[in-house]
């Protein structure tokens, strides 16, 4: 189904290429979300788009834990045994493991079975049994990377949902470099790549607002690649008895993070860092995020339930919705 849609879109683009259109746009589904690519690069732009589509398909086949044959699914189904993996995946997992330790475990890619238990995407979501949550939390989950391959605890499942879209942004940046693309804006769900020596204005989504609605505009200047990623509790979850139960889990409790934050937007030097940081900083809260952000040369915009906006690091931003108030983050 997905593949068919891609082929149709590709055919349309190839016909556009015949006119050597300077702007190329493509919207498609991958990584369980909407991918939109807008680039300027003449005929090589079409080549770049094609390469992006192919790369996204390969990434899905590597990282999607729900695709039976993906590398991640193979690790998850190996019942605690080490599975040989590609050098690429080994590289990503090694970086993620180090990041996870530096975040004091706030980023934890072994929570797959807990996410399954909460089943945030269910048509009729319900609270999981607390003893079941505890059992999955206490299970030996550790990720081990050795010469033989990668293993995860027999009762755990790897889930790269918090970093996959950022990794994809990095891979796309590599393609744009190779194809000599002049300017591009790529968004994969809440992860964005801005490419080119230009000034970009990027809206930060209004938490709980309509799709496309933003409360602030970031201004990003610089050359090469810039990466922005947002994690929000509005993204996936359910409301029950006046509480919001959402898809970002606190690895200490196995339950959705309840710290008053509604979204965290991060600007970082690479896509995977922006994505990993947006999730980790959401878990850590403003105060504990400071060191992690500065060690990663990143900046962040936090929004809380009272529509207060806190900034850590250097960010050029205009708040365009008067309901949101910039507030000093106390050290
Ligand atoms: P989104 O996927 O909406 O862009 P994030 O990047 O914040 O948002 O990733 C959230 C996803 O990461 C969840 O849907 C889940 O698959 C996974 N996840 C949830 N909590 C954590 C956590 N503490 N550490 C790592 N991954 C997590
Ligand atoms: Mg993330």
Image (tube, helix red, strand yellow):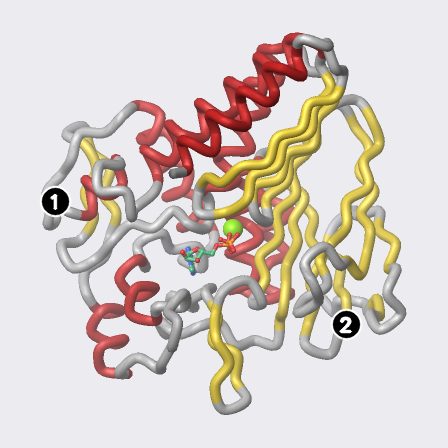
On the rendered image, what quadrant is the C terminus found in?
bottom right
Residue drawn 51% across and 81% down?
239
User: In the image, 278: left or right of 97?
Assistant: right
Q: Which mark is residue 11?
A: none
**Residue in the image at 35% along x and 25% along y:** 88
| Residue 4 placement, left or right of 316 | left
Image position of 102 (left or right of 140): right
The residue that mark 1 highlights is 78
Which residue has dot 2 on it? 308
Query: Are discs 2 and 1 less than 8 Å apart at CB?
Result: no
Where in the figure is residue 67, as x and y percent of width and height? 28, 42
The CA distance from mark 2 to mark 1 is: 45 Å
Query: Does residue 127 appear in the picture of this structure?
Result: yes
Instruction: Pinpoint residue 238: horizontal percent, then vertical percent.
Output: 48, 75
Q: Give x and y (percent) for residue 294.
A: 64, 46
The answer to whether one can see residue 195 in this image is no
């Amino acid at each position: 189904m997905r593949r068919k849609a891609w082929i149709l879109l590709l055919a349309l683009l190839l016909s556009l290429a015949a006119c050597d259109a300077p702007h190329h746009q493509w919207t498609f589904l991958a990584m369980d979300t909407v991918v939109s690519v807008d680039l300027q690069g003449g005929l090589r732009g079409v080549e770049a788009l094609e390469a992006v589509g192919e790369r996204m398909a390969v990434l899905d086949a590597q990282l999607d834990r729900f695709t039976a044959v993906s590398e991640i699914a193979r690790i998850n189904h190996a019942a605690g045994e080490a599975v040989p993996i590609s050098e690429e995946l080994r590289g990503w997992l090694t970086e993620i493991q180090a990041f996870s330790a530096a975040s004091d475990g706030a980023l934890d890619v072994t929570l797959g079975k807990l996410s399954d238990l909460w089943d945030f995407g269910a048509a009729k979501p319900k609270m999981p049994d607390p003893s079941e949550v505890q059992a999955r939390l206490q299970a030996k989950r550790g990720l081990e990377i050795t010469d033989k391959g990668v293993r995860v605890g027999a009762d755990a499942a790897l889930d790269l949902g918090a970093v996959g879209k950022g990794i994809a942004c990095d891979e796309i940046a590599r393609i744009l470099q190779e194809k000599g693309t002049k300017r591009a804006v790529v968004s994969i769900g809440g992860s964005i790549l801005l490419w080119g020596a230009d000034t970009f204005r990027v809206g930060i989504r209004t938490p709980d607002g309509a799709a496309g609605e933003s409360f602030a505009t970031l201004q990003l200047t610089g050359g090469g690649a810039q990466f922005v990623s947002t994690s929000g509790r509005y993204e996936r979850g359910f409301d029950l008895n006046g509480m919001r139960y959402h898809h970002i889990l606190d690895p200490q409790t196995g339950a959705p993070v309840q710290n008053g934050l509604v979204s965290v937007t991060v600007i970082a030097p690479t896509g995977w860092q922006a994505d990993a940081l947006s999730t980790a900083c959401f878990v850590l809260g403003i105060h504990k995020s400071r060191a992690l952000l500065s060690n990663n040369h990143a900046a962040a915009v936090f929004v809380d339930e009272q529509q207060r906006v806190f900034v850590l690091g250097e960010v050029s931003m205009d708040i365009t919705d008067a309901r949101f108030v910039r507030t000093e983050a106390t050290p």
